[in-house]
């Protein structure tokens, strides 16, 4: 009852003034408190890693030998095209790749693949087929392609043997050009 009487005595303008004073004090307190947390650039610097060298080993571990990033480190390709393997690769390409790639210079979603076996090492082509996400994160050439085409290549869950067949189909296409 006492409290109620006291509130009734306070005018509406008094409440507004009191509320504004309370907000000002809270705002001032929030701006000046937390000295140990730092402010502005200090707070940003505290949230960052101690040095950029901590992130460097992951990037530095990827040596650019033109083979890309993935399970394929060596590929034996003959001077002649294995027609049976290329035929298998053609079927796989049409089922899994042709929605985004053409065997010409024409870009669809991804780049045209004419001459890909002349521009890239066989290991790089197979690693791009098998491991597109890691390639676009770590391989300089794949990063550049992603920046140019703005679309992450979809992992089609192709196994290594099928990737080799697709590579042979690309080789056959490039020899025919």
Image (cartoon, rainbow, N blue to C red):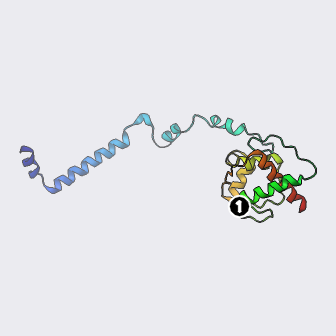
Residue 118: tell me if it is visible.
Answer: no
| Residue 168 in picture, x, y percent from top left | 84, 52
Quadrant for residue 94, please give it.
bottom right
Horizontal side of residue 85 vs 160, given as left or right: right
Placement of 102 over or under 3, stated as above or below: below
Q: Secondary structure at mark 1?
A: loop
Which quadrant of the rendered structure holds the C terminus? bottom right
Where's residue 93, x and y in %? 76, 57
Q: Position of residue 137 (x, y in %)?
A: 67, 46
Tell me what residue is drawn at x 73 percent, y 42 percent: 70
Residue at the farthest right position? 79
Q: Could you say which quadrant of the image residue 111 lies in?
A: bottom right
177 lies above or below 7: below
Q: Which residue is mark 1?
A: 100
Looking at the picture, tell me which residue is in the foreground, 25 or 123: 123
- Residue at 30 percent across and 44 percent down: it is 26
Q: Residue at x 72, y 64 (%)?
A: 108
The picture places residue 139, in percent across and down from the top left corner, at 73, 46
- Quadrant of residue 171 within the rendered picture: bottom right
Front position in the image: 10 or 153: 153
The answer, for residue 83, to whether it is visible in the render is yes
């Amino acid at each position: 009852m006492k409290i109620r009487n006291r509130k009734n005595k306070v005018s509406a303008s008094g409440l507004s003034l009191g509320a504004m004073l309370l907000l000002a004090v809270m705002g001032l307190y929030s701006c000046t408190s937390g000295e140990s947390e730092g402010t502005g650039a200090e707070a940003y610097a505290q949230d960052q890693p101690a040095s950029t060298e901590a992130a460097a080993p992951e990037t530095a571990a990827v040596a650019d030998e033109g083979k890309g990033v993935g399970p394929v480190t060596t590929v034996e390709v003959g001077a002649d095209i294995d027609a049976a393997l290329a035929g298998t690769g053609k079927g796989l390409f049409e089922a899994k790749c042709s929605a985004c790639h053409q065997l010409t210079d024409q870009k669809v979603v991804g780049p045209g693949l004419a001459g890909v076996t002349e521009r890239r090492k066989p290991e790089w082509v197979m690693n791009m087929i098998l491991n597109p996400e890691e390639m676009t994160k770590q391989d300089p050439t794949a990063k550049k392609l992603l920046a140019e085409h703005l679309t992450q290549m979809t992992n089609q869950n192709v196994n290594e043997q099928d990737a080799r067949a697709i590579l042979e189909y690309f080789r056959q296409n490039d020899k025919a050009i």
